[in-house]
Image: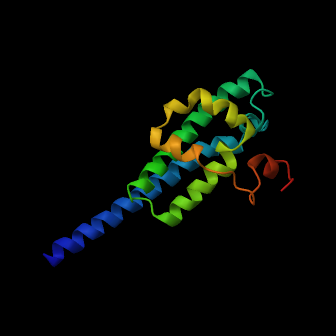
Amino acid sequence: MAYLSAQIRKNALSQRSVVVDSLTHSLIALLEPLGADPNQMFATVTEDWSGASEGARMTGASMLYTTFKLFGNAWFQQRQGTLDREQWESWDLHIRVYYYHRRGVKIWWPLRRTMCAAGFRDYLEKTEPVKDLPPISELIRGKA
């Protein structure tokens, strides 16, 4: 019986590691093309949706949808107990600093919020902006 309990705990830890690794690789795959964007299109749409070009908004809409689905998955994994509190805190800060509380995203969000799970929507909409971390646009422009 003790052996079975030890195996179950080991399996649970292994599953958690796989989830954390999968989420991390998904984020890297999502963000990698943005580093090669000489026009900083994604940063532009997150800050000024209306002022961005139609092409930038088209790319931005797709990137935002993918980003919010990935973060919704991370939220679900922490709610299920698969992603521990410390790991979730970095995901939480990331989505609030770089995405959800940005001016451009505030225009996009009401038009696409129903594409995310209700619990994740409720969570995001109750969050406050993070005051002590600069948005990505300030980092890119060297104003941080």
- In this image, 130 relative to 123: left or right? right
Quadrant containing the C terminus in the rendered view: bottom right
How many marks are shown on the rendered structure?
0
How has the structure been colored for display? rainbow
Placement of 67 over or under 92, stated as above or below: above
Placement of 80 over or under 64, stated as above or below: below
Q: Nearer the viewer, residue 99 or 66?
A: 99
Most distant residue in the left direction = 1
Quadrant containing the N terminus in the rendered view: bottom left
Most distant residue in the top direction = 54
Q: Image quadrant of residue 90?
A: bottom right
Q: Nearer the viewer, residue 42 or 103?
A: 103
The location of residue 104, given as percent across then percent down, is: 73, 35
- In percent of the image, x 77 and y 24: which residue is there? 53
Most distant residue in the front direction = 126
Q: Image quadrant of residue 110?
A: top right
- In percent of the image, x 52 and y 59: which residue is there? 88
The location of residue 3, given as percent across then percent down, is: 17, 76
- In this image, 111 relative to 36: left or right? left
The location of residue 103, given as percent across then percent down, is: 74, 38
- In this image, 48 relative to 32: left or right? right
- In percent of the image, x 56 and y 48: which residue is there? 27
The location of residue 21, given as percent across then percent down, is: 46, 57
